[in-house]
Amino acid sequence: MHTPLAHTPLAELSTPALLLDSTVLERNCDAMARRAARHGVALRPHLKTSKSAEVARLATRGHGGAITVSTVAEADYFARYGFLDLTYAVGISAGKIDALHRVQHVHGARVNLLADGVEAVRAAAARARALGARFGLLIEVDTGGGRGGVAPDDEQALRAIAAEVQRSESLTLAGVLTHAGHSYHAEGLDAIRAIAEAERAGAVRAAGCLRAAGFAVDVVSVGATPTAVCAERLDGVTEMRPASTPSSTWTRPRAASAASRTSRCRCWPR
């Protein structure tokens, strides 16, 4: 990557400093883009690690520029650099609506929210309505991670959330989203493949439940780097959200071949 620091000796760098090998970075991003294309899904990389517009351009090359963020600050930063299709992949609280509305209003961005409960939807919708703002909303589905989300077979909860969104004047149901974060701790290729299939099947099942009840579901989003790399099928899925692509190549899970996980990311502390 060509920056003013490209030829700066390490001893002269202001710290903390993040250094990336551009050759490995581009190779990783291209590999993930090809994988998404082979599966016929869109790529919406999670930029919470790199927090870099230059990395984001590489990670979204040929895939339209849609990205995933985890903080309001990230949403504002990337929107300022022209990344205007954003999924804020943290369970929404009403207190974040004002700042996300500013991101949409100032930069012309479109922000999708995430929720797994009726009360969160109701509170976010009320605040958005007061501001005259509109957002898309994804229902979070728990496919094994246990951090948040509705069980894919909990039809009552899924439909109650969707109905609350539908009643809102400020929210539109965009679809469903899941994240198999527990795949990072899986041991072995077979274990990760099993998690990837559970992630896919759970998201597709939740989407099917909503569609059967008459709700439109355009987005079926899955996302964890190990499952994105190891998934054998993604039928029924519309997009994937790998996060670790820029700095590490997950060609195989760590237990299968630790040596094949190539990293070219270094951080110099203060």
Image: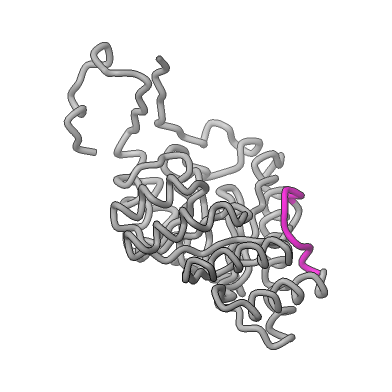
Report the magenta residues as a range. Answer: 145-153
Q: Is residue 122 left or right of residue 155?
A: left
Q: Nearer the viewer, residue 117 or 188?
A: 117
Q: Position of residue 264 (x, y in %)?
A: 40, 31
Q: Residue at x 41, y 30 (%)?
A: 265
Where does residue 151 sit, x and y in percent of width and height? 79, 63
Q: Is residue 240 magenta?
A: no
Residue 172's place in the image compared with 121, above or below, is below
- Position above or below: 14 against 103: above
In this rendering, position of residue 99 left or right of residue 119: left
The mark tally for this picture is 0
Residue 180 coordinates in the image, percent (x, y):
67, 52
The x, y position of residue 200, in whole percent, is 66, 64
Is residue 89 shown left or right of residue 64? right
**In the rendered image, is residue 40 in sight?**
no
Q: Which residue does the image show at 68% across and 49% down from the upper left?
A: 192
Q: Residue at x 51, y 36 (%)?
A: 260
In the rendered image, the residue lying farthest to the top is: 11
Quadrant housing the N terminus: top left
Does the stretch in magenta take in 148? yes
Residue at left offset 69%, top offset 88%: 214
Q: Residue pushed farthest front?
A: 130
In the picture, the quarter occupied by the C terminus is top left
